[in-house]
Amino acid sequence: MINFAVGPVQMDEEIRAIGAEEVPYFRTPEFSAIMKENERLMKQFTGAPEDARAVFLTGSGTAAMEAAVMNLFTERDRVLVVNGGSFGARFAKICEIHEVPHEEIQLESGRALRAEDLAPYEGKGFTGFLVNVHETSTGVLYDMELISDFCRRNQLILAVDAVSSFLADPFWMGKWGVDLVLTGSQKALALPPGLSILVLGARAIARVQETAVRSMYFDLRDYLKNGERGQTPFTPAVGVLLQLHKRLTMIEEKGLEAEQARIRCQAEDFRSKIKDLPFEIVSNSLSAALTPLHPTGVDKEGKVVSAHRIFEILKDEYGIWICPNGGALADTVFRVGHIGALTPEDNDSLIAAWKDMQRRGLL
Ligand SMILES: *Cc1c(COP(=O)(O)O)cnc(C)c1O
């Protein structure tokens, strides 16, 4: 099996080996030291300021999205949400559930955010901004410089979901004045799912301290307090945290830029190899994490080939997984990931499968 999904993704052998070991007891100085290292490296790789803190939550990326909204905003805020796909819609839904007043900036599928989209909200009394820097459902990477300038001018608390962008694209928390950034374990971190990480800057920490969250598990004050001694309030995903430590240490050895370059090369290699296949890239601002494609070919019966059918044929007949889309895009768009332990040779196998499908009149 070759996995080009966007998460969970293929893991390095060293990481998988840790998953096969017994899970140790964790209220120990040894585990605390590992957690402190995890915090240091997560801050380093998100470009966080020195006084930032990292929080480790056992729950997938959506848990971190919800924790961010619950801990940063209340019914007294007015939050802008960029909604260019299903992850933007998820932030809006979380605001709705927690009764955080919000407005959505709706973008058509595949389109990047422009200055004109933000202009109507200038000086309108908003207090917060929520964005998924890479809207994974459509494969659009938003312009963080644009967002950062807007938020600074309007003094907004800026919280960024970088779940599928972290490690694939450069991220500069300090430079962009991001107050909170969050990510998850199963995307470019290439770990098992179940862990999410939030990095909070000074303003976000202050907000967390003054917000009375109506939840036990999602009260980040407890995580910040316990984190001071390298611990978590409840039993965390200990095994995944050990794998995280290994992965972050491996990246530190090569350098963050080398890991980002590896993913970018994997993406560029793929994009150069699909030039004569019947696909169209459907985003005007790409992340290195994935390529969203719209099939334009017709099958031997003259019918336009469905994106979901291509996913099924690859899975069932070639042992290759790509990432289908849900909802309205299910038949028209599929995505190919470039994150995880993939190589250019894996790209060759996928291209060869598509060429074979063409020969069979399926593409
Ligand atoms: C994958 C992803 C998430 C997290 O989804 P989970 O299924 O909860 O892990 C959140 N935001 C974005 C942009 C993602 O790509």
Image (tube, grey):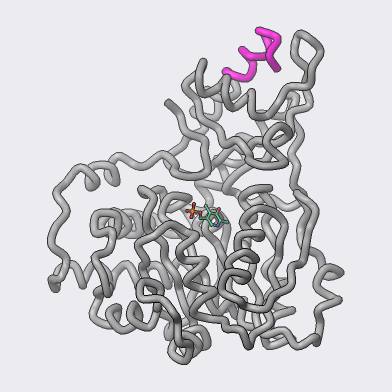
* Image coords of residue 64 (percent x, y): 46, 66
Residue 360 is covered by the magenta coloring: yes
Q: Residue 84, located in which quarter of the rendered image?
A: bottom right
In the image, 217 versus 248, the foreground residue is: 217
Q: Is 171 left or right of 17, judged from the image as shown?
A: right
In the image, 313 versus 16, the foreground residue is: 313
Q: Residue 160, located in which quarter of the rendered image?
A: bottom right
User: At x 63% / y 62%, what residue is drawn?
Assistant: 133
Look at the magenta stretch and give its main secondary structure: helix
Quadrant location of the C terminus in the rendered image: top right
Q: Is residue 100 above or below residue 320?
A: below
Q: Is 251 left or right of 84, judged from the image as shown?
A: left
Q: Which residues are magenta?
A: 352-363
Residue 269 shows in this picture = no
User: At x 45% / y 70%, what residue is drawn?
Assistant: 198
User: At x 68% / y 14%, what residue is drawn?
Assistant: 362
Q: Is residue 21 above or below residue 331?
A: below
Quadrant location of the N terminus in the rendered image: top left
* Image coords of residue 319 (percent x, y): 47, 21
Residue 314 shows in this picture = yes
Q: Is 223 left or right of 188, judged from the image as shown?
A: left
Q: Is residue 17 above or below residue 117?
A: above
Q: Is residue 297 above or below residue 233?
A: above
Count of residue discs: 0
* Image coords of residue 201 (percent x, y): 49, 82
Residue 109 is covered by the magenta coloring: no
Q: Is 110 left or right of 144, judged from the image as shown?
A: right
